[in-house]
Amino acid sequence: MNTTAQLKKNYLLIKYQKLIIVSVLIGFLSAVLAIILKRMTEHYETILLSKANGNWFLFLLFPLFGLGVIYFLRQYLFQKKENKGIREIFETTAQRRNSLPIYKIPSHFINGFITVIFGGSTGIEVSTVVATATIGSIAQERENLFNRHKTELICAGVAAGITALFFSPFAGILFAWEVISKKVNTVFMLVCSIATAVALLMLFLLDEKPLFAVELHGWHWYALPYFILLGLLAGMHSVYLTKCVLFFKKRFAKIKKHSNRIILGALILGISLLFLPQLYGEGYHAIKESIFMANHTLLTTSIASTFLGIILLKPIVTSVTLASGGDGGVFAPSIFIGGFIGLLLAICLNTFFNANVIPLNFMILGMGAMLSASINAPFTALFLTCGIINDYTLFFPILLTCLIAKYTAQYIYPFTVYTYSSNAK
């Protein structure tokens, strides 16, 4: 008995030692991948958007070129298989024999990059998530000791990738739990904590900055009813986003020729960008400009029509981008839309009801609320929102709006773009 117990103890010791080592490696590789993709995308998106602003026809040409390149890469480099986003992770974790092939790393990295810099109205977050999940999946396949821990190692890669993108290890771990794993055990906490700690270290070593630079000045209790209203609006609009994605994917799937899908998608996207360049790429450039002017923005016909156009068109152009072959998901679009919903609501309240609310606060709250409702992950959205501004001043209001938005969306429509199946009504 003592010999058996000692053997089991030695086995567990070796296993946990190897888990610690592989978690460090996963965290390092995932963080480096996410940081490189983020920096490259931001750099080249800025350059190409600047050129398109000076030459209007490029708004029509760039999406066509980007979607065309992605199609040819898929046909001749990536085994003719379309990227399914986070669904690929679900399919892998659902059965032990499934795995994420190594080509998914360059596939999502390159396609996500090309999609965004050439105007595809989505973001690199889902591309990063699947690529880093693949790192975890490959690590699991290399060692027999890890056969029972595929989901945990995939979650370690995902958590590290989210940490590197949004400067929040809590958001990384919570996303891995709320969206991917749905459960927590000792191995999950061990590998995710180590991977996110390594990712956080890489952020400091490489001097990465939070996504948005803001200066908050607190919040007022009298604004609580308006926070609730914002949560309700974000929850309802997230259903519109989800329905748009599902609708356009279904419609475009009926178009047999890929070239026709690309041309139609590029045409819709290009025309939309001509009228609203803010929709170009992930849209963070427009958010940064609006954050800077938020507290000084006055309601005019031009401002109202622009914001309404952004809020209503962004779900459509995001859906068209994905349906015509672009790589990405609803992460960045949700943050983008939520920011403008919050800003428009705040300036309307101040103009018509003399509410004296702080528009910048409402922008931040809207980002979290919309993301929470779109992915049904309120705690991920809470810490992610605090991470992208590196400020926890609005912790309670963000938590409140995230919870309200999530349950509002679930009440109206119980599915997200991740959980919807062909059998859902």
Image (cartoon, grey):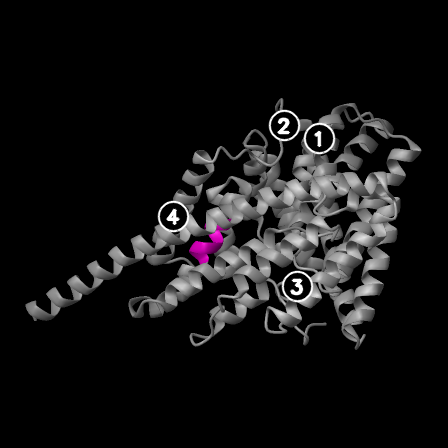
Decide if residue 69 is on the left or right side of residue 78: right
Q: Position of residue 400 (x, y in %)?
A: 61, 41
Crowd around label 1: few <14 · some 14–19 · many ≥20 (10 Å)? many
Q: Which residue is at 54% across, 64% downward?
A: 104
Q: Secondary structure at mark 1?
A: helix
Q: Which residue carries the number 4 mark?
A: 193
Q: Position of residue 238 (x, y in %)?
A: 72, 53
Q: Which residue carries the number 3 mark?
A: 415
| Lower sequence index among marks 2 and 1 | 2
Q: CA distance from mark 2 to mark 1?
A: 7 Å
CB within 8 Å, label 1 to label 3:
no
Q: Relative to the observer, which residue lies in front, 128 or 53?
A: 53
Q: Relative to the observer, which residue lies in front, 308 or 362?
A: 308
Please name which of the two marks, 3 or 4, marks the residue nearer to the observer: 4
CB within 8 Å, label 2 to label 1:
yes
Q: CA distance from mark 1 to mark 3?
A: 31 Å
In the rendered image, the quadrant that contains the C terminus is bottom right
Q: Which residue is at 42% across, 55% downward?
A: 156
Please name which of the two marks, 3 or 2, marks the residue nearer to the observer: 2
| Lower sequence index among marks 1 and 3 | 1
Q: Is 156 in the magenta?
A: yes
